[in-house]
Amino acid sequence: MASAPLKLAVMGAGQIGARHIAHVMNHNDASLHAVIDPSDAGRAVAARTGTPWHADLASMLASGRPDGLIIATPNQLHVEHGLAAIAADIPVLIEKPLADSVAGGEALVLAAKRAGVPLLTGHHRRHNPMVQRAKAIIDAGRIGRIVTVHAFFWLMKPDDYFDMPWRRQPGAGPVLLNFIHDIDLLRHFCGEVETVQAFASRDIRKHDVDETAVVILRFVSGALATVNISDTVVAPWSWEHTTGENPAFPHTDQSCYHIGGSHCSLSLPRLEVWSNADRRGWFEPFAVSRIVAVDADPLALQITQFCRVIRGEEPPLVSGLDGLANLRVVDAVERAARDGALIKVLH
């Protein structure tokens, strides 16, 4: 007999919260228990979807407990809301970043461990079948040893994106909001980061947060990576534009990651493997093959996995510990940019 759909509540009805709400409502194994958001916009989302609305978690708990909670509130509230969910013994999926500080992330991970409550971080890209194919290619040794990686995140966030004050404040720049996704994937592909160097600037908009950064990463494996990040450049080379994951963004059919191996190189999201036809050498002709991955929305697949974790069928694909590890790298990047120093990442 099939299990009844799990009751999932979504806390935060903004841009990403609205997408979670839509995916939960369309999921065969989940039902939308409640929308939690004190704003008029949150109340309107609940009314539009025919879902109970609550201004806060305590109000929702007074009317009934969900099987799981997705937290998609502003970064600065993730720790407060996550700790409250854990205290209520509710499995929780917290949108990336897990917290707005390493200390906050550590508090969440420790609380979840002590309470025995599943804690997941919303790095949804890991659920993308294309990412899983790329990981399988790397793990099979097809490209040899990873030597170097270059990743782009270049796009233009429009002026009205910053109408919400929290997006102009510390903790809301592209290093924490966007680059942390890339950190998660680079750790997934290359292993743990050992040291970082970085430069950052906010010379265009002059908000209190970075808008452009150049980062150098050295992995424990010895691999090196450069990551170039900006949310104030008109360009097609971002994960959002190249993958087609989010239909709100135009699809450019470009690549934003280039992974250089000792035997082949791999581009993402195109999943092109470049190699020499016979022996390796700069005068040798190239052979290129393009791998095909299933086209599926990783946010929907993340809901599927969350349900399996709640039921105890499998461990989180991206745990709270992963979210904390990503925060530690971002913290090191921010300190490196601020101090002009080589920073060692603590594990």
Image (spheres, rainbow, N blue to C red):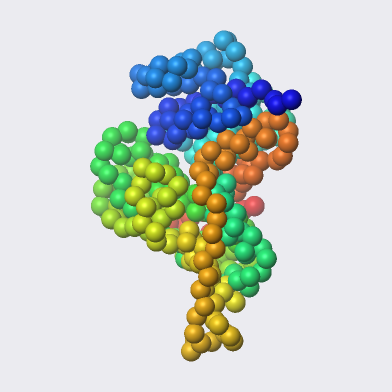
Lateral position of residue 15 relative to residue 104, left or right: left
Residue 300 visible? The answer is yes
Residue occupying the far front of the picture: 1
Q: Nearer the viewer, residue 345 or 307?
A: 307
In percent of the image, x 61 and y 29: which residue is there? Answer: 29
Count how many numbered circles sit on residues in the image: 0
Q: Position of residue 155 (x, y in %)?
A: 33, 53
Residue 342 horizontal/vertical position (percent): 51, 63
Asked if residue 195 shows in the view, the reply is: no
Looking at the image, residue 268 lies above or below residue 16: below
Q: Residue at x 55, y 31 (%)?
A: 27
Viewer-proximal residue among 303 and 115: 303
Q: Quadrant of residue 201?
A: bottom left
The correct choice, above or below, for 54 with respect to 252 in the image is above
Task: Establish if 214 lies above or below 273.
Answer: above
| Residue 268 drawn at (x, y percent) | 49, 61
Could you tell me residue 261's position as x and y percent?
57, 72
Q: Residue at x 36, y 57 (%)?
A: 252
In the image, is residue 190 above or below residue 161? below
Residue at 37%, 52% in the rendered image: 251
Asked whether, in this view, residue 73 is left or right of residue 222, the answer is left
* Quadrant of the rendering where the N terminus is positioned: top right
Q: Say left or right for 271 vs 317.
A: left
